[in-house]
Every structure is written in C-alpha cells, then in structure tokens.
Amino acid sequence: MFLAKLTLLGLLLSGCVHLPPHVRQELECEAGGTGIAVRGPACLIQEPIVRQQAAFRRQRALSIADVPFATGQIILIERPGAASLFLSLMSARFAPWIHAGVIVVDDGTPYVYEAFGIMMPRFSGSPTDGMRGGARRVPLASFLKRDGIIAVYDPPVRVNREVLAQFARRHVTQRTPFDGYFDSSDPQRMYCVEFVAHGLRAAGGDWPTGAPVSANPSAAVALRWLKIAGPELLLAGDLVEPGQLMWQGSRRYSPAQIDSYFALKRELHRRFTAEQKLGNLLQWRWQSLHLRPAVNLYFQRGMAAQAPDPIALAASLFEEHVPLDADEKRMSATAVRPGP
C-alpha cells in the first residue's frame, strides 16, 4: 500500500491531495506554541539543509542473489522521509517498518504477495475514499528495486509455510480488495499488514498485538480526515520476531545507518507527546509533505559517521526533555553508530 504508485505513503508527497484548512493548520508553525528546538520551535528554523536522501548516495542495486529467499518468509520495507514519519505518528506505540508482504516461490521464481492500495487523485473529501487496489503479486526482483530499507524474516517456527503461501495465492486469485480505512476487524478488505497477519494466523501463527491509534490531538485531526477510526492499528514490525531476521539491505544506506535511522525515528516518536503538533516535525509545502529543516538535520547528523546516539543528539537539538523508561535507556546505550 505504500510504494510504487500513488499510495497512501506517496500520497502526501504527490501533490494529488487538497488539505482542508483544519488539517493544514496542524502542519503550520506556531511561534508561541510548544516547540522542540533549542532556539525556539523547530518549525522556525529554516537553515538551508541538503535533503536527507541526497546526503546518502550509496546506490548499489539489490538482486535476488543477495537474498536467501524461501516460501513463507515475511518481507518488510521502510522508506525514510516525511510520509513515513507521519504514518508512524498515527500510532500510540512505535514499531519499525511500514509495509509487509509474503514471499512465495512459484515455479522457481520468487514473488512478493502483498495488499497494495492505489490512491486516485482527489481534490476534496478524505483521500482514503479514493483508494483502490487489492491483493497482488510482484516479482521479488521488482520489489528489491524499491527505494528504502528492506528486510526478510523467517516466520515463527509454528507457522506452516505452505498454508501461508496458499492463503496468499487464494486472495490474489480472489482479488481481495484493499482496505483504505485500515480496519482490521473487516476481513473482507485488507491493508498490507492485515493481509500478512491473517495469513500467519491461518497458517498457525498468532494474531499480532494491535497498537492504539495516537491520542495526540493533532494526530487525531489527521486520523479523522483520513477516516481511520481505530481503535487499533496493526504495525508491520509486530509481524516478525527479531531472532528470525534472515537478510536486510538497502540501495542507499549502510547497515549501521539503517540501525541508526530506526533508533532516530523511535526517539522522535517518543518525543511526540500530547502537547506537540504535527507542524513541529512536518510541513506542507508546494502541495506535498516535508520534514521540518531541524528534523531533517537531526536525521542527517544521526546517520553520519561518529554520530552521537539518538537521545544525546536530540538533547543537543531539541529543548523538550522527556524522562526515559528503563528500556529506552538501554536502547540509547546500545544504539549503533553509522559507519563511513
């Protein structure tokens, strides 16, 4: 649902959406409001900063020869940027990754089976009303050409991989429609994570624990506009177990930069407390969604060589200090620094 065409991820970057005034207001800078940067609200800083993606030019094509693929594996993808951060802020709990699919080898060729939503251009109403699409399969070789960070996980050992593959094939054959409202209680329509979750459960796995939608008032405005009622969302990172990671790669980022990126994003999510507005982190400019310059700088510095860990970096850039729990302190102490 998030990638190659006018999807919900790309939607806010495509210029095909008209933001109503009440949503646009949440993306505006309030000079007198609660900010996150030392020199004032982060949204006031307008230093010229090279775009985050342009700062990392590792362009190495990924090939299926790189991937130890097998039927029944879960494939995940993350695309660093404004839309990905926006989507993660819609959930009260952080989990990495934004899209999921199932690898199935058909007649010797590996494919990714996924629920994929195509967003049609709309200039009024909720953009999710115009979402079309459904379950489909694409060659793994094509999937690996998508920009971002990709990982492949083995499913839990109790999952019957062939049953999972049969589930995926059946829904592609049936053309099960895409659920643009992200309602996991409706099995007749599925979004990407829900598609994989139903498949895992059908194959003997557990249903993932849902995350409550964000209670942040600014995020709630966006959720109502998108007609995402919750009360829970299924998150791609909850589909897999850390010990089952088989492969991870990117055309653009080094392994250390990948680890740092997720830790940086987690820290922004932690700091997005109830008094924060979406506009403290994001801005609507030229009919598309962008990171605020200070947030862009945070990612650039955090993914550079010899960078401090995300919490120390945030402390040097942001003025609001939120107490850490024990797990977050351990995460900070073990954060991986990017290599050259």
Image (cartoon, grey):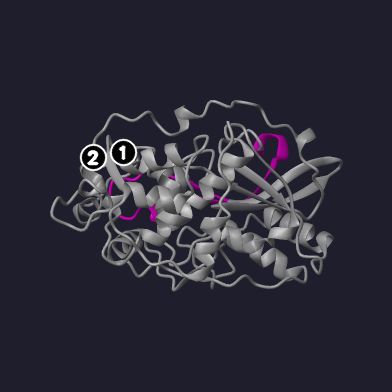
Q: Which residue is mark 1?
A: 293
**Mark 2: secondary structure:** loop
Asked whether the residues under the numbered discs 1 and 2 touch, taking CB atoms below 8 Å apart as contact, a structural biologist would say yes
**Mark 1: secondary structure:** helix
* Start-end of magenta stretch: 116-143
Q: Position of residue 209 (x, y in %)?
A: 58, 72
In this rendering, the answer to whether 294 lies above or below 238 is above
Indicate the amino acid at tag 1: Pro
Of labels 1 and 2, earlier in sequence is 2
Please tell me which residue lies in front, 47 or 317.
Answer: 317
Q: Which mark is residue 42?
A: none
Q: Position of residue 194 (x, y in %)?
A: 59, 63
In this rendering, the answer to whether 63 lies above or below 278 is above
Please tell me which residue lies in front, 235 or 223.
Answer: 235
In this rendering, the answer to whether 319 lies above or below 255 is below
> Badge 1: how crowded within 10 Å, few (<14), some, or many (20+)?
many
Q: Is residue 66 visible?
A: yes
Q: Is residue 1 visible?
A: no
Indicate the amino acid at tag 2: Ile
Distance from disc 1 to disc 2, alpha carbons, whole Å, reads 7 Å
Q: Position of residue 162 (x, y in %)?
A: 83, 60
Q: Judge left or right: residue 224 versus residue 244.
A: left
Is residue 124 magenta-colored? yes
Q: Which residue is mark 2?
A: 45
Q: Position of residue 206 (x, y in %)?
A: 69, 73
Callout count: 2
- The quadrant of the image that shows the C terminus is top right
Residue at 78% over, 57% down: 165
Please tell me which residue lies in front, 269 or 82.
Answer: 269
Q: Quadrant of residue 300?
A: top left
